[in-house]
Structure formats: structure tokens, C-alpha cells
Amino acid sequence: MAAVEGWGLIMKGYTSTHCLSPREVEIFELVTAFVAALPERDREGVPVRCHEVARAVARYLDLVGAVGVQVVDGRCFAAEHTWLVLGGRLILDTYAVARLPVVQLILPWFGSVEPYQAGAARTDINEGVVTMLCARGSKGGMQ
């Protein structure tokens, strides 16, 4: 953590210091690095979808010892979407819809999770893309 001259450490934010465990913050940071290493398109030039990204991240989190990770298919706003739930309470959106940054860790407060509506499990997942994303992302996410 870099110091700002005369002020000490840079602000982390109330959520990361009071609402999340150190492990939850670590998972968010690992996933952010993992996703940053992913390509925008697959080997055929097709844009990578959130459905495969979330599944690749779930596999990665299993490798780094995260427990209680659930893949959820459904809708976010008007879009078909896939995200993760951590520990049954936090939404880890690995490819956020209409928001930046791309990776978001969302606590279920004040309607923040209302756009996320779970649905049926998808049947159109490209496992080859998931495997490719795991290989590429692990280069960025592993410490």
C-alpha cells in the first residue's frame, strides 16, 4: 500500500475495513487480477461472455481454497447474466453489467442486489472457453 506524502496510507474504504473479512478482500483482489489477465475474445474471435468468465473464476477460487462459491445464472437488469455468490451472502460479479469496474463485490444492503435475479442453470456453456480462460487468468491471479 503506497503512502501519500504527509497523510499515510491511501483510503481503503469503509466496506473493505469494516464490512468484509480480510479473506473476502483478498478474494476480491485475486479475482480482479485474474479477470484483468483474460482476453476480450476467445480463440475464434467471439467476445467472451460473463457465463464462461464466472465459471472460470469459480474454478480458480476452488484452486486458491475459497469455500462456499456458487455459480448463479439469471438476469441482471435486462441482461442474461451469470455471477458468483460467496459464503451465501456476497455477490461477486466477475463481468459486471453496465458498471465499472468490471469485477465487483456486492454486499446485500439497501437494494444493491435487486438487479440480480437467479434463474435456471444455463445449458449453452462453452467448456473449451472456460478452460482457456482458466489458463489465461491464472497467470494474472496466482500469487
Image (cartoon, rainbow, N blue to C red):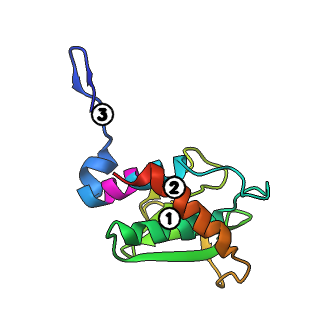
Q: Residues within 10 Å of mark 1 (few under 14, many from 20)?
A: many
Who comes first in sequence, dot 2 or dot 3? Answer: 3
Q: How many angstroms separate mark 3 from mark 1 (CA)?
A: 27 Å
At label 3, the amino acid type is Met
**Callout 1 secondary element:** helix
**Callout 3 secondary element:** loop
At label 2, the amino acid type is Gly
Residue tagged 1: 57
Compared to residue 113, the image places residue 15 above or below, namely above
State yes or no: residue 27 in magenta.
yes
Per the rendering, the mark at residue 11 is: 3
In the rendered view, does 75 fall on the left or right side of 24?
Answer: right
Query: In this rendering, does residue 53 appear at all?
Result: yes
Compared to residue 4, the image places residue 78 above or below, namely below
Looking at the rendering, which quadrant does residue 121 occupy?
A: bottom right
Callouts 3 and 1 close, C-beta under 8 Å: no
In the rendered view, does 143 fall on the left or right side of 139?
Answer: left
